[in-house]
Image: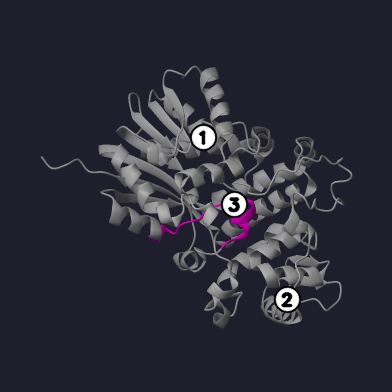
Amino acid sequence: MTTAGPRPAARHRADDRRTAPADAGHWPDVAAVPRASWPVRAITTSVVERALRRLPLRVRFTDRAALGLGGPLMEVRDPKAFYARIGTRGLIGFGESYMAREWDAPDLVGALAVLAAHAADLVPPRLQRLRSLWARPQPHAQRNTPNGSRTNISRHYDLSNDLFAVFLDETLSYSSAMFRGFPADWTLLAAAQQRKVDRLLDLAEVRGGTRLLEIGTGWGELALRAAARGAHVTSLTLSKEQRELALERVRRAGYADRVSIELCDYREARGTYDAVVSVEMIEAVGAEFWPVYFRTLDERLAPGGRVALQAITMPHERMLATRDTHTWIQKYVFPGGLIPSTQAIEETAHEHTSLTAARRDGFGAHYAETLRLWRERFTERADDVAALGFDETFRRLWTFYLAYSEAGFRSGYLDVQQYLLTKEDPPR
């Protein structure tokens, strides 16, 4: 799973963080409510309130009657600012309004899950057809060219290793775990992460002597467990912070002779490998470069080899409708990111490679539990986040991001897959 927003330098005392206004220097689009003309406000109010009346939500305003059919509570504290942001910036404005404390929800995941479940019909069909007129396109600067990818990845993963350590378990795994059952608790997370890694290594048939290419290092857990099997691992990352800590973990484990971690774009990979594993990396590739990504998997894989791929997915129709739209997640969390559909993955692999999708297993409910544990840990350790120099606006941003993601999986809007892709031996 990148925060595009800046890291504020100011540190606030724990008892001040809930009331401190957004720093205009670091968060200009949160600190200032955008100007919206009367027609924009009127149309936005009409469209949004019509949608809210039909949802299993209870939306309470300070200046008008509550809306909704009942369910999780949303409290809109500043309706004028709330509608001005949505009217001028759409869903980006909706997220910024939360960051600015203009609305809140006691059960944030529950409220967002309702919205996620109805994402396809929140906007009337006639306005959906005019999406290109009102939805902002993705910034050209966030294209995932080799240089662009380095910048995009750095803006998230180079925030601070200490920040991620606040809410991740000791394996430092930042992707979906696999639990034995629900509900899960924090003490089970590390084992569930290792179970996920081991299943991927099993899919790729990684064993002693296997030459393994990992695209997307994370903080090194998969490389460590592959090396423990006797594999020789080449792992690629664009994050300097991740590479530094992953190398330290490799040295401590005594696997420096088996694991090489390179600061390298996947397009620059060389050599041939018996297996390739890539965990939740495709979401940072961008649709424009999906064919290049899959061709890289194909070209680096020896005949008879296997690719194990873990990917977050979304419905194909929603992916097509939103793929060119600039989103709140892209602006503040994952610049240049795009979640594919299973159809897009399978069609791209089929059309651009000799790889065959031999198996696919979805486990979205496991990601919802993983995100819940991260979110609860992040909230419990808010003072530790503040001590690292991250202000209250940043904390609300990340609370919203983790809750927004969890809601996507709980509603079924998002899923996560483990793929096995195979490459047949050439005929003799």
Of the pair 219 and 35, the residue shown nearer to us = 35
Horizontal side of residue 161 vs 38, given as left or right: left
Q: Where is residue 373 in the image (x, y as percent from the top left)?
A: 66, 44
Question: Which is nearer the N-term, disc 1 or disc 3?
Answer: 1
Residue lying farthest to the right in this orientation: 15
Label of residue 368 in the image: 3
Of the numbered discs 3 and 2, the one sitting upstream in the chain is 2
Q: Name the residue under label 1.
A: 194
Residue 365 appears at what percent x and percent y? 55, 53
| Three-letter code for the amino acid on which mark 1 is drawn | Gln
Residue 35 seen in this snapshot: yes
Start and end of the magenta stretch? Answer: 326-343
Count neighbours of disc 1 (C-alpha within 10 A) and say few if under 14, some if 14 to 19, many if 20 or more. Answer: some
* 38 relative to 383, above or below: below
Q: Distance between the residues labelled 2 and 1?
A: 42 Å
Of labels 2 and 1, earlier in sequence is 2
For residue 68, the mark is 2
